Structures are given as structure tokens and as C-alpha cells.
Image (tube, coloured by chain):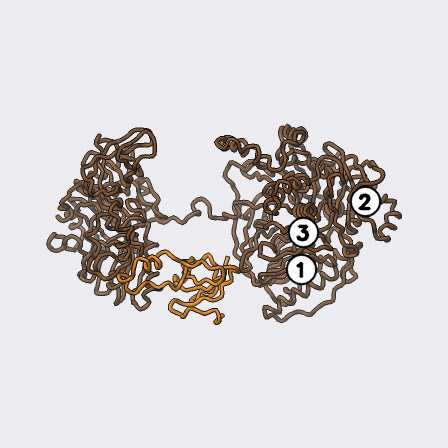
């Protein structure tokens, strides 16, 4: 039988459109407009999941985003999503969902053994059990982690697209119930730009399930007219199926829009979800309230649900969840549900905790033949996979004790209502302050901090007429504040069949344990936290709310305690006999509901995750099979392997080509900064450690930058192009940092200096040619006189190279005769290809960063960031020669005479030669005087760079060693991770061409 | 997440900016003449007040200018933004 619990007529579903879906492998039918929860209830499926800790049978508790129990695994394969609330999932053709946290099936779950053994799993079970011995924690953790968590995440890559949207407006309204709609209407009519956000597929809020009137007209029709008017306004934007997730400073709101999640076919062009980042001048919170469960023995069985949820299933979806129904309430409002159920053919009993029940309600119950048990409580429930029987007994409220006869009732559905909690999550995130209301017995908004408005039930007001007037007026006020000409005021009247205000909610506290018998009184359904756990936490001293929360896990999990928090606090207040205000509440944090990482990441995935920078020659490198390396955001050729070559073969060939003939490197990624202005020389004197005043136009100079701590920060060659014009180069990775460094001092410290810095890194392609044949080769392609006499080392010339206006620098990072040819980027690839063509006779060899590293290490040239680490001075690197003694001041100078930088036992930069002549030391290896069997050993330093040198045919290394310059020739030991110990000798940092003749040729 | 009023560009989202610590710490005019303690003070010591704080920001993804911000660290309200070289505002200016 299908849809056996469906009423004959009624509801807001489309009975003409049948939808097929699968739950736990079984096929069912529902209607268009159903949620998964309503369709399951219609098919008399009540058992939908197992609880987290005790694996107890659980059903559907609510009908909205607060659902703690009915959370399912939705979808298959790469699209599967865990922890989805069945109460929110809109039914679509072919939907597949399954229960979580059960094995082998939800009906026969092995884990439910935990329930039988529950006495050994009290609050704090893990803390108490797995603390001995401490060394075994890592072992325990492995198993605990396996058992933790609900559902499973997909292992395949997500095939869907997620978008992000930045949005700015006057007014954002969160919640499309009647209050939100009226505020939107007032602000919209006044001309404000309005964004209205609602998490449901239909606007109108909880009133859609109730009988009410607005201005003496049918309420549902009235809502439809308002919605139609809002949609007709160009200045109002409405987002349905969109949940406001986070409310941050300066009215910054994030919201998740489920764009195509409810469709059976996911679109290729439309994103699955859209993440909104909204900044608005004012925010209106109109999120309404969540109904509060009652705490009684075994209040978690399938078939027990919130009264408002029962009402929603009946009115909106035409589903009667039970035939023999008990309403358990402490307030008037829930009676509407009882009367509706009675009207639709259910047999009703009402258990009310209060002594004095409104006579009109009593009369109505009598008229309908509803049995009413006043000042009573449900004291136990029965039924393994669905509730089937309850016991009811009178409660002596003064003594907080049970009295009188115990009555047994058969039932298949319990509707409970403990009053309403305003949904203050977002308000609290926005730093808004709450206070405890003793009439409503819940926390309500008290003090607003940001430019915000809170209206309707969200504000703790449950009177329809008041809410209508307040909401509309606040919409007008907001418009007025923002200087719009406001629309006319309207006097609103609203009437509900049973209004909430007629009676305050009486608190129903569980009281002493003996008040109700039975096993478990659940406070937090999702985390299986019982009243006994809260008692235990208090007994064991976890009496602050934050401690109780963490010790018992109440209020945690995917629902973040939307249904449980207030009950837990009320119970704590009862235990300590203190007002709830003094107990306080825990902190609300974003997100409001679980959200996907896909939406947060948006399009910033794969190759869009981080921008990729490519030189103008990149395509050529690709075509010639370069292996790439990431340097900052740059893609640089690492090496260019020929057939069957591995990295070692390729680097060896490339190194020897440079040393013996001619190599070419794409050095375009070097940072390049153009400096101009009358004070540039003065500025460089402050920035660099060496002196710049006497540098001639057309000359280059190597410079070292230090920070104010005296530590090396960047290096590079800077060239004087004109009297007040310099071309600075920086390390590839440091370019942006140096640019900011220069600007920092120009803008904040030396405001009188006239210097202009322009980044020109991407404007120039740099072709660095190096090797004994580089002069002969380049001379054939340029009109610049490259002779030793007319273009000496460390000079700069301008002229044509391959017919292109170029800047040529005679500088060298390899130690060989070398020219750096700078051409405008658009000619980069052209000139590179010309070079490759014309260089054939010299066996021109493109080389990558690895060869560049080897060649410079052979020469003992440092790489900032590899050989230095932000804690070394120029003196530590034996670079005293570049630190001016004459200059009065430059950045870092004063710190060179701090006691710490003057210590004699500082680590110094040295070379290292392994005695076996074959081991290439791992970079980062520790250097010790004498290796012992196990630490501690006296550490002398570490290896910073290490390579095999093809030209020398043995390994070389650079290192930082304590007092290293005084240890030249001394033997040290390097213990490796594999247990071997390598002997090495401390050497000079220059391994090749010590005299430095080659680059001067 | 702040909205910051760049003195050159106007109100922009915080994601366009970065913060560079306390403002109004002048580099000593003649570092060679200050003692280790004073130099250490300049290098390492910063205020961490509960309340009004003056700090340096840059509009990185905008005009790339540096400027100062007067912010209340309790409420995170930005009270004033002003250009480098402008007088440090007193509490009475607010």
C-alpha cells in the first residue's frame, strides 16, 4: 500500500505529479511538493535513523532545518552528501537516500547494543576510560575516530559547479515569514534596494500551516498577494531555498543558496549552489522561532514529534502521521494542532502539564470528544521501533512529585510542545545580547549592537497583530533612516484561530529523577544527551555552561542544539536553583546550518585555486618537454630532459654545457622594479647595506637588503640607467615583498623623499646566456660592441638584439661569462627562438632552475630564503665586504651592534665536502661534532644547499655552522635519517674558479 | 569583516586591505646614537590595548597607499582613517 497516511484532500502538494524515490533500497512514491520526511511519513515509514551514541531507533522530530534525528545520506557516488535533513530535502524523481549510523540496516542495527550497555557510557565516557596509560592514547584514538561521525563523505571529485556572489544593498531581510514579508513590502514600496532571504521553497513561514486572517481577509491569500507584489518590484530581490549562515561585523552576511539541489537533473550551466556574500546598510532578522521539545522518559521514540511539525505535515503535505494521537503540551498554541488532527479523523487525547487550562479550550475538547488530562505528564513510553503505548500520571507541582493513578494509553503518535524559542542564532553571532524571558521561558533578543532590526517571533513577540504592525513600521523606519521617501503607514489586524498570547508558556521541568520513571530523558536528541548526563556533569563539577556543553556534548553536532539548548540550560538552572539568566548560554557560531565546502570554495578550485604566472616563453618550454617547478606563483622550467634522461642526467648535461660552451636560462621571473626620482640614490643608500652614490651611469652593482633586525631580507643587482633612474632586480619569490618594503618606507617613514617605484617584472623578458661562448654567440646578433674593453663585467648597454631594442646587462649568476638580455615581453619568444636557432653551432642548451642552483652553488653564491632563513646577518654569510662602514645609517645597520648579532658563536656560512666523495647530503641535515647513537648530540649547524657538481665530479654542499669560518679543514659528522653517519670536511664556500677569472673574460 | 574607508578611495571591503601593526612608531632619527634598550623598544615592543588602537593599513588591492586607522579593539568599530603624516587624532577629536 502506498501513501496510506495521506489524507483524502488538502495540503499544498501537487497530487497530480507522482514522484518515485528510494529510501534504504526500497521504492516509494510521493508527490511534487513533498519533502523526503513528509513522503516517508505518508508511506508510514517512521524509523529513519539510529542515534549517535546508543544507536536508538529514531524518527522524524521536526519539519524544518532544526531537525536533529532524521538526517540521511543523500545521493550516490561523487554527489553523495552526508547529514542531510530529511525535513528539508525536497522530493525529486529518482531521489535516493539512506539511513546513517547503522549496520547492517536501520531495522537491525548491531550498534544498538550500546543502548543495552548504556550504563557504562555516561557523559565523559571517553575522557574517563581512555586516559590510562597516556602512551596508548594514539592507539585508542584510531578506533574512536573510526566510530565517530555520521554518514560518509564522497571519495570521488565533485562534478558540480559552485558559484560565489558578492551583493550590496540597503536592506537584507532574513526570513520570508509574514514579518519579513511585511518589512520587505514597506521598504520596497519606499524605494529601498531589498534582499529577502528564506530557506524554504515557499514564502510565508509557519502561517502557511495555520488558519488565520489579515485585515479580516483570508491569510493565505493575503500572503500570496504580498509575495506577488514583492516579485513585481525591481528594487526587491528574493532568494528562496537560501539559508543565511553567518552574520559578521559591519553587517556582513553569508548565505547559501541551493540552486539546483531540488532538481532531478543537475544542470551543466547553472551552479548547484551559490554562496552569497552580502553587505547591507541594515539587516532585518525575521527568522521566527523553533518549537521546544518536552523532556520525559524515552521521549525519542519514532512517532514522537513536535506539535508544530505534526501540524505542518497535516496541513501542508496532507499527511496524518498517526491515527491515535496524544498531544503533550504546556501551552495553548499546540491545541490548534490537536483540533486539526481531530478534524482529519485522528483519535485525540491531550496531556497538559498545567493546572488551569482556559475554559474555552476545555469546552472545545469536550465538544470534540477529546480526552483531556490536566496537570499530568507522560511518564513512560513504549514501542521498539515506534511508540505504541504511554503511561500518564498526575503531577503535584508543588512537591514536584507524581501522585494519583497511573493511566495507560495506546497511541501511535505523540505530538509535543514545550513552547517556542526565537531563532536567535544569527542575532547572537552579530554580537547581539540576549536575556531570559520568564513568561516565554526562553532567551529573547535584548540589546542590538549592529545596524539591525529584529522583528516578529524572532524578537520574542507572538502576537500576530502586533507583529504585523511592528514589521511593516520597521520597514518604513529603515527606509526613512536611509533617506527614502517612505510609503504610507498601514494599520494591520491579524487573527489566529488560537492565539499564542492568551496564555504564557508554563515551564515544564523534569524535576527530581523520581518524577518520571523509565530509562532515558533526552535533552539533545542528536548527541544522545540525557537529563541524567546533565545531572552527572553538575555533580562532577562541570557547572559552567561551556563546560557542561563540552563534557556532555549537548548542543553540538550538525543541528547545533537548535531544539536542545534551552532545555539543557533550564535543567541546569533547576539543578542549581538559580535563574536561567545566571546560568547563561553558550556562544552561537556560524554556520547556522551545515554547509558544503564546495560552496565556500566556489570557483577557486583546480587551476583557479591560485593564480599561475607564466613567462612569455612558457609555451616553448612546454613544447620542449620542460619539467616545471613552482616558484611562488610562477611556473619555471626545472630541467629539460632529453629522451630517457632522468633529472640527474639532464642537470649534468645542462651544467656541463654552460661550463664548456653555452647555456640559456629564462630568467624573466626575476623581480624587476623601475626606480625614478631625484632622491633615488639617497633612497638606495638607505635600503641597501652598501653604498650607491658613486655608481656610474651604465654600471650594475650587487646589493643586499636587510630588515631593521639586521637580517638579510633580499638581494639582487641594481643598475643605474640615468642620473635619477635605476633598474632594480630582486629574487623571484621576493619581488612583491621588496616592492611593498620600498613603498612602506617611502610612504610611512621618509615622506619627503621623491622616489617612484614601478614594478616592471612582467614588462621584460630576460634571456640569460652563459658560458665561454656567450660573447661570440651574442655578438653575431647585436649591434652592441661586446668586447672586453668596451663592455666590461658589471656594465649595462642598450642596443638591438635580433633587431629588437634591448637592455643587456653583463652580470653573472653562474660564474661564467654571461649576458642578461632584456627584451620587451611581447618579443620574448621571438628572440628566444632566434637564440636557439643561431646558437646551434655552440650547442646552445636551455637549462632550468636546478642547473642554475648547482652552478651558483659551485661559485658559493647565496640564494636568499634557501641559504638564509631570516635569522642571518650579512656578517654571518661572510659578506662583510658588502656592508658599508662609511654610511651613517641604512636599514638594519643599528642592529649589527646588538649583543645577539655580535655573538662570536653565531652560525657562519661555509662549504662542506663529504669525505667519501659520493654522498649528496640531504638539504636540512644536521651537522654534529660527533654522532652519537641517539640524541641529544651537540649540534653545530645544518646543510642549506647540497648538489652533485658535474664539473668537479663530486658532491658539494653549503652549510651554516657555529663558528664555521674558524673551523675550515675540520672534520664534522652528519647523521642521516637512515642511521648512516657521513663524515665531511668544512671548506671554503667557493668550489669552482676561486679566482673569479671566468666571468671577467 | 570590516568595511574600511580608504582616505584615497573611499569605503571598501576588508579583503582589499592588509594590516601592518601599530602606527606612530617613528624610526629614531639617528639610530647610531640610541642605546640598545631604545633600539629594542623601537624594534620589538608594541601596545596591545583593550580599546582605542592606532594601526597602519595598506590598500593592497586598490591604490596601494599606506594610511592609519583608529580602531576600538573591543567593538571593532573603526573610528577614523587618516593619511600618513596627518596628526594623530586625540580621543576628543572623535
Picture layout, residue A162 above or below residue A58 = below
User: Which element type, helix, strand or loop, lies under badge 3?
Assistant: helix
Residue contact at pointers 1 and 2, CB within 8 angstroms: no
Whether residue A698 can be seen here: yes
Q: Are marks 2 and 3 on the same chain?
A: yes
The image quadrant of residue A236 is: bottom right
Q: Which residue is mark 1?
A: A455
Residue drawn at x 69%, y 60% as measured from the top left: A226
Nearer to me, A482 or A823: A482
Q: Are marks 3 and 1 on the same chain?
A: yes
Which numbered disc, 1 or 2, marks the residue that appears first in the sequence? 2
User: Which element type, helix, strand or loop, lies under badge 2?
Assistant: strand
Q: Which mark is residue A396?
A: 2
Subunit of label 1 = A
Residue A648: x, y in percent?
27, 34
Residue A288: x, y in percent?
68, 54
Nearer to me, A929 or A142: A929
Q: Quadrant of the N terminus of chain A?
A: top right
Subunit of label 2 = A
Subunit of label 3 = A
Residue A133: x, y in percent?
51, 31
Q: Which residue is mark 3?
A: A580
Which numbered disc, 3 or 1, marks the residue that appears first in the sequence? 1
Residue contact at pointers 2 and 3, CB within 8 angstroms: no
| Colour given to chain B in the rendered image | orange
Crowd rating for badge 1 (residues with CA inside 10 Å; few <14, some 14–19, many 20+): many
User: Could you tell me how far apart the alpha carbons at marks 1 and 2 are, in whole angstroms?
Assistant: 38 Å
Residue drawn at x 66%, y 56% as measured from the top left: A435
Amino acid at each position: 500500500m502506498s501513501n496510506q497516511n495521506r489524507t483524502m484532500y488538502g495540503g499544498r502538494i501537487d497530487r497530480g505529479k507522482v514522484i518515485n524515490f528510494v529510501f534504504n533500497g526500497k521504492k516509494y512514491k510521493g508527490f511534487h511538493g513533498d519533502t523526503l520526511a513528509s513522503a516517508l511519513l505518508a508511506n508510514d515509514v517512521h524509523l529513519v535513523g539510529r542515534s549517535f551514541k546508543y544507536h536508538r531507533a529514531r524518527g522524524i522530530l521536526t519539519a524544518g532545518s532544526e531537525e536533529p534525528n532524521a538526517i540521511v545520506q543523500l545521493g550516490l557516488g561523487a554527489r553523495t552528501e552526508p547529514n542531510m535533513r530529511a525535513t528539508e530535502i525536497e522530493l525529486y524523481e529518482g531521489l535516493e537516500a539512506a539511513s546513517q549510523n547503522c549496520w547492517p540496516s536501520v531495522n537491525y542495527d548491531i550498534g544498538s547494543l550500546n543502548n543495552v550497555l548504556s550504563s557504562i557510557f555516561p557523559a565523559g565516557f571517553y575522557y574517563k576510560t581512555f586516559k590510562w596509560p597516556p602512551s596508548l592514547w594514539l592507539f585508542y584514538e584510531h578506533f574512536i575516530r573510526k566510530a565517530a561521525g555520521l554518514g560518509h563523505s564522497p571519495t570521488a571529485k565533485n562534478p558540480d559547479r559552485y558559484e560565489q556572489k558578492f551583493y550590496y544593498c540597503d536592506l537584507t531581510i532574513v526570513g520570508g515569514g509574514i514579518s519579513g514579508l511585511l518589512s520587505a513590502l514597506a521598504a520596497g514600496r519606499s524605494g529601498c534596494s531589498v534582499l529577502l532571504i528564506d530557506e524554504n521553497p515557499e514564502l510565508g513561514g509557519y502561517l502557511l500551516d495555520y488558519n488565520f486572517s489579515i485585515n479580516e481577509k483570508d491569510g493565505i491569500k493575503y500572503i500570496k498577494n504580498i509575495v506577488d507584489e514583492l516579485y513585481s518590484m525591481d528594487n526587491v530581490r528574493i532568494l528562496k531555498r537560501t539559508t543565511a549562515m553567518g552574520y559578521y561585523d559591519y553587517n556582513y552576511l553569508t548565505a547559501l543558496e541551493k540552486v539546483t539541489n531540488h532538481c532531478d537533473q543537475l544542470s551543466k550551466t547553472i551552479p548547484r549552489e551559490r554562496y552569497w556574500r552580502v553587505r547591507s546598510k541594515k539587516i532585518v532578522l525575521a527568522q521566527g522561532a523553533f518549537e521546544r521539545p518536552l523532556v520525559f522518559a524515552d521521549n525519542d521514540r519514532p512517532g514522537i514529534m513536535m506539535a508544530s511539525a505534526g501540524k505542518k505535515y497535516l496541513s501542508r503535505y496532507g499527511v496524518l502521521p498517526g491515527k491515535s494521537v496524544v498531544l503533550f503540551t504546556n501551552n495553548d498554541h499546540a491545541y490548534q494542532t490537536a483540533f486539526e488532527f481531530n478534524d482529519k479523523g485522528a483519535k485525540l487525547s491531550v496531556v497538559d502539564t498545567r493546572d488551569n487550562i482556559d475554559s474555552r479550550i476545555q469546552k472545545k475538547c469536550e465538544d470534540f470528544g477529546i480526552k483531556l488530562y490536566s496537570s499530568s505528564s507522560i511518564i513512560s513510553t513504549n514501542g521498539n521501533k515506534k511508540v505504541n503505548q504511554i503511561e500518564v500520571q498526575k503531577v503535584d507541582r508543588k512537591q514536584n512529585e507524581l501522585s494519583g493513578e497511573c493511566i495507560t494509553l495506546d497511541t501511535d503518535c505523540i505530538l509535543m510542545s514545550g513552547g517556542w524559542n526565537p531563532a536567535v542564532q544569527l542575532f547572537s553571532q552579530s554580537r547581539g545580547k540576549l536575556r531570559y524571558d520568564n513568561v516565554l521561558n526562553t532567551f529573547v533578543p535584548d540589546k542590538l549592537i549592529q545596524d539591525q532590526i529584529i522583528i516578529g517571533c524572532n524578537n520574542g513577540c507572538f502576537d500576530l497583530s502586533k507583529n504585523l504592525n511592528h514589521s511593516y513600521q520597521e520597514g518604513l523606519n529603515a527606509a526613512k533612516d536611509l533617506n527614502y521617501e517612505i510609503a504610507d503607514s498601514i494599520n494591520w489586524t491579524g487573527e489566529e484561530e488560537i492565539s499564542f498570547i492568551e496564555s504564557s508558556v508554563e515551564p515544564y521541568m523534569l524535576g527530581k529523577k523520581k518524577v518520571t520513571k523509565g530509562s532515558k530523558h533526552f535533552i539533545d536528541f542528536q548527541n544522545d544527551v540525557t537529563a541524567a548526563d546533565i545531572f552527572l556533569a553538575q555533580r562532577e563539577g562541570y557547572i559552567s555552561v561551556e563546560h557542561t556543553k563540552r563534557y556532555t556534548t549537548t548542543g553540538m553536532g550538525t543541528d547545533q542544539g537548535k531544539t536542545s539548548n534551552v532545555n539543557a540550560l533550564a535543567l541546569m538552572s533547576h539543578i542549581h536553583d538559580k535563574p536561567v539568566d545566571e546560568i547563561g548560554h553558550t556562544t552561537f557560531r556560524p554556520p547556522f546550518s551545515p554547509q558544503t565546502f564546495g560552496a565556500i570554495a566556489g570557483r577557486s578550485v583546480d587551476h583557479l585555486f591560485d593564480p599561475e604566472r607564466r613567462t612569455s616563453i612558457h609555451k616553448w618550454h612546454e613544447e620542449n618537454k620542460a619539467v616545471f617547478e613552482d616558484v611562488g606563483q610562477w611556473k619555471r622550467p626545472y630541467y629539460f630532459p632529453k629522451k630517457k634522461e632522468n633529472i640527474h642526467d639532464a642537470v649534468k648535461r645542462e651544467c656541463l654545457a654552460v661550463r664548456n660552451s653555452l647555456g640559456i636560462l629564462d630568467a624573466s621571473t626575476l623581480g624587476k622594479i623601475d626606480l625614478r626620482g631625484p632622491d633615488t640614490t639617497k633612497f638606495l643608500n638607505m635600503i641597501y647595506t652598501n653604498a650607491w652614490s658613486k655608481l656610474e651611469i651604465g654600471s650594475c652593482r650587487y646589493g643586499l637588503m636587510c630588515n631593521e633586525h639586521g637580517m638579510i631580507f633580499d638581494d639582487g643587482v641594481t643598475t643605474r640607467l640615468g642620473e635619477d633612474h635605476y633598474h632594480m632586480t630582486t629574487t623571484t619569490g621576493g619581488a612583491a615583498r621588496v616592492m611593498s618594503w620600498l613603498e612602506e618606507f617611502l610612504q610611512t617613514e621618509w615622506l619627503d623623499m621623491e622616489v617612484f617605484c614601478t614594478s616592471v617584472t612582467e614588462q621584460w623578458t630576460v634571456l640569460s646566456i652563459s658560458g665561454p661562448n656567450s660573447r661570440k654567440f651574442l655578438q653575431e646578433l647585436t649591434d652592441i660592441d661586446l668586447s672586453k674593453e668596451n663592455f666590461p663585467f658589471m656594465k649595462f648597454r642598450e642596443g638591438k638584439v635580433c633587431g629588437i631594442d634591448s637592455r643587456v646587462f653583463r652580470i653573472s649568476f653562474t660564474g661564467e661569462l654571461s649576458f642578461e638580455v632584456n627584451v620587451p615581453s611581447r618579443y620574448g619568444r621571438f628572440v628566444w627562438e632566434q637564440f636557439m636557432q643561431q646558437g646551434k653551432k655552440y650547442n646552445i642548451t636551455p637549462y632550468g632552475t636546478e642547473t642554475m642552483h648547482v652552478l651558483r652553488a659551485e661559485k658559493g653564491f647565496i640564494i636568499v630564503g634557501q641559504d638564509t632563513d631570516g635569522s642571518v646577518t650579512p656578517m654571518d654569510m661572510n659578506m662583510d665586504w658588502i656592508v658599508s662602514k662609511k654610511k651613517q645609517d641604512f636599514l638594519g645597520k643599528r642592529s649589527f651592534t646588538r649583543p645577539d648579532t655580535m655573538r662570536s658563536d653565531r652560525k657562519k656560512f661555509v662549504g662542506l665536502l663529504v669525505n667519501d666523495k659520493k654522498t649528496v647530503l640531504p638539504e636540512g641535515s644536521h651537522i654534529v661534532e660527533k654522532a652519537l647513537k641517539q640524541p641529544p648530540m651537540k649540534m653545530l649547524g645544518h646543510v642549506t644547499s647540497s648538489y652533485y657538481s658535474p664539473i668537479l665530479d663530486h658532491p658539494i654542499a653549503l652549510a651554516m655552522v657555529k663558528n664555521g669560518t674558524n673551523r675550515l679543514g675540520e672534520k664534522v659528522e652528519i647523521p642521516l635519517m637512515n642511521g648512516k653517519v657521513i663524515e665531511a670536511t668544512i671548506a671554503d664556500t667557493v668550489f669552482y674558479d676561486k679566482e673569479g677569472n671566468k666571468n671577467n673574460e | 569583516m570590516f568595511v574600511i574607508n580608504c582616505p584615497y578611495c573611499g569605503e571598501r571591503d576588508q579583503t582589499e586591505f592588509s594590516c601592518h601593526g601599530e602606527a606612530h612608531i617613528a624610526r629614531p632619527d639617528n639610530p647610531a646614537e640610541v642605546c640598545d634598550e631604545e633600539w629594542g623598544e623601537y624594534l620589538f615592543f608594541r601596545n596591545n590595548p583593550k580599546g582605542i588602537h592606532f594601526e597602519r593599513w595598506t590598500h593592497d588591492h586598490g591604490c596601494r597607499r599606506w594610511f592609519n586607522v583608529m580602531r576600538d579593539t573591543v567593538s571593532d568599530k573603526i573610528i577614523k582613517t587618516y593619511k600618513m603624516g596627518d596628526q594623530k587624532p586625540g580621543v576628543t577629536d572623535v
